[in-house]
Amino acid sequence: MTVKSSSTSHQQLSFSEFKKEVLQDYKIAVISRECSYLGRREVLTGKAKFGIFGDGKEVPQLAMAKAFKKGDFRSGYYRDQTFMMAIGELTPQQFFAGLYANPSINEDPMSGGRQMGGHFATHSLDEQGQFKNLTEQYNSSSDISPTAGQMPRMLGIAQASKMFRNLPELKNSKFSNNGNEVSWGTIGNASTSEGVFFETINAAGVIQVPMIISVWDDDYGISVPAKFQTTKESISEILKGFQRDENTDGYEIIVVKGWEYPQLVEAYSKASKIAREEHVPVLIHVKDLTQPQGHSTSGSHERYKSKERLIWEKQHDCISKMRDWIIEFELTDENDNVLKFVDSEEALIRIEKDAKKEVNQAKREAWNNFLNPIKQQRSILAQLLENLASKSNNKSFISKLKNDLTAISDPSRKDLLSTARNAIIYVRNESSSEKKQLQNWITNYFETEQPRFSSHLNSTTDKNVFHVKEVLPTYNENPELVDGRIIIKDNFDCIFSKYNDVFIFGEDSGNIGDVNQGLVGLQEKYGKLRVSDTGIREATIIGQGIGMAMRGLRPIAEIQYLDYLLYGLQIMSDDLATLHYRTAGKQKAPLIVRTRGHRLEGIWHSGSPMGAIVHLLRGMNILVPRNMTKAAGFYNTLLECDEPALIVENLNGYRLKEKLPNNFGEFKTPIGIVETIKEGKDITVLSYGSTLKIVEDVVSKLNQVDIDIEIIDAQSLLPFDIKQDVVKSIQKTNRIIIIDEDVPGGASAYLLNEILEKQDAYKYLDSKPVTLSAKEHRAAYGTDGDYFSKPNAEDIFEAIYQIMHEANPSKYNKLY
């Protein structure tokens, strides 16, 4: 007699094997639930800061794990602990290490304590920062907290499978097995109200990619019930129009109750087969789930759920229902023998007791591993303080600090450093070897501990942006002058020829070759998959790029104009820019985001929110080339690196004439290096992008009044001027003005901080440093609107002249 098991579709298991599998699943569910219960207690006792757990979602996650194969990717959210345990990528001890924020990536492999518990990841990179063989492991892209923020990335992960299947030249056993990998997403029912959910659902239906999205539906979004979240109170109902049929593409939509273990297993097996073989997206609406402890440790669900609802939840808890099913299960074989999973409830009670014991032991070990290194350092510090007190005039104060520290039962690193630094204040006017020893301890402790919390914002591998050296463009003897768009287009042509894993996609990028003709003819030459059009959906354009980059491809995501970047900025800020950091260097997505900006027309077509971008996208390279040759060089540089970047092409530059290089694809613009494009002696003028040309246009007028300016092109905002060339210029001119078209206090203020504080340029200034930016409002429409909204030639001339007037009023008379 054989029984078909869900875990291995097309495979037959004996009843004993089937029984073993079911009981093992039950044990995992109980372990996960016990972790949730004990995790909440650890938060309420103060050992952990916050807890958000997966209780109530255990059984469907077991079913999902059965259909999940090596090479697949999960893009989920903070309720998926049971799934991670079921695929063997999360142990109870690691669960608690994450809850305690252990800053060791070995103890908390999800993030090394950088994210709160419940944010799961696997390691895509080896110790050298290179991709591991992703087809030989289960993969989970690193979670983020913003609701539905996991959706855009999920799309890109799935699209990578389509690329690998349909482009034979991409064959790479390290990244894909003929595109058979599925992108598995999870989301709470309330989060389906977010715009990026619908944007992603629509995009996946259009592109037709192997994506399975599970909606865990427990009828609430924190305290707000489904009737205020979703039309008809059902996401599967309102998405029925996406259901595929024999004539049109779309989704397979499956609805299943969250406690029905056999039906769940069958549903996930079916979904996996459809998505994996047909590359069709699937929505699984898992209904009637519960949340036994409420949303999180920040409150109690008794405050907003009725007594009747709470009783219903207890009766319909998925683990309780699975338990009943196991006890009641009977099957008669061909010999009329009655087969059962358990003969009595005692077998399940033993499993439950063993699970509790295992979780308690894991909790103790995780806490000891977190606390012991701190206690060891506390012992060292206490002795140093005792020694210091014995030689200090402030013995009583230092002794109190030491005694207060040793009295803390569960000290933190903060407690240690705070105590040591306060002790130093008491001996600030004293001199002793004991003081020096404490100072050394503080310095060494910072050097040891700070990287645990700050490392890997950017790549530390030999493929970071600083390893690429400048290669200048070369020219024929009499170079042709061409529109800038020709240069960017010809360089992209070389890129696509040189790298078969490079793709570009965006609004109008394909058929017409982008709105400024920088890709014209390339779709016809390289195909619709490599140069493709998308819908008007910036968030998922970014998500496509993130997901594909995480799977070893080199996408270029095009956002039509800089103003439109705001639609995708949340995904760039919360996901892309933080990925390498929040995984402590264990995942990367070297996505290049291409856009164009600066001056055009009107409020929504001429924004330059560079200050906002610089601060929201720490972890990315922000590049602002002044012309298309510089821009092309940045693309060439980045494709030899493993870091994400944003390139803002100069919108006014596509039709300006430039010399035609003869080494397309080879010349490289260095990142983090400024360029002095005109030397001068009176004042340093720093600018970038389109404003730089206006500065150049003012040079002759300034020369007429005997002002000789030095012009520096920032080129790269993040990173900025790593060789500190601006301060070298200021040492010569003793004056600085920064000119850009962001709002006041935006990028120009950021640059001023970099120059004055980081480069210490204030020491060489004879005049007040000045920033000249746009007005506080968005740019008004038309020629006059631009003139009165953003720095114009007269503004620049007068601002520079005024600085020189204040420096030498007898030579530079006041203008008015």
Image: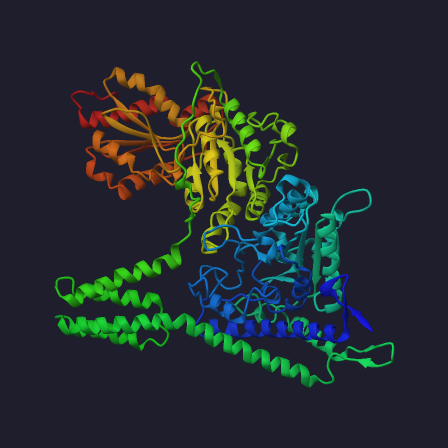
The reply to whether residue 76 is in sight is no
Q: In the image, is 282 to the left or to the right of 782? A: right
How does the figure colour the protein chain or chains? rainbow
Tell which of 807 and 349 is nearer to you: 349
Is 218 on the left or on the right of 703, as rendered? right
The vertical placement of 176 against 752, above or below, is: below
* Residue 742 location (% of width, % of height): 40, 34
Q: For residue 53, what is the image quadrant? A: bottom right
Q: Nearer the viewer, residue 721 or 48?
A: 721
The image shows residue 741 at horizontal and vertical percentages of 40, 31
In terms of depth relative to the viewer, which is nearer, 249 or 303? 249
Which residue, as the protein is rendered here, is positioned at the far top?
478
Q: In this view, does 83 lie to the left or right of 564?
A: right
Q: Can residue 329 be seen in this view?
A: yes
Q: In which quarter of the image is residue 137?
A: bottom right
Is 661 positioned to the left or the right of 158 in the image?
Answer: left
> Relative to 212, is 374 above or below?
below
Q: Position of residue 441 (x, y in %)?
A: 25, 64
Instruction: Identify the residue at image location x=54%, y=29%.
Output: 494
* Residue at (84% x, 81% y) in the render: 337
Say which of 469 and 523 sits in front: 469
Residue 436 percent coordinates (x, y): 18, 63
Count of numbered tags: 0
Res 11 → quadrant: bottom right
Q: In this view, does 71 lie above or below 754?
A: below
Say if 419 sits above or below 447 in the image.
below
Q: Quadrant of the N terminus?
A: bottom right
Q: Which residue is drawn at 34% across and 61% down?
A: 449
Q: Quadrant of the C terminus?
A: top left
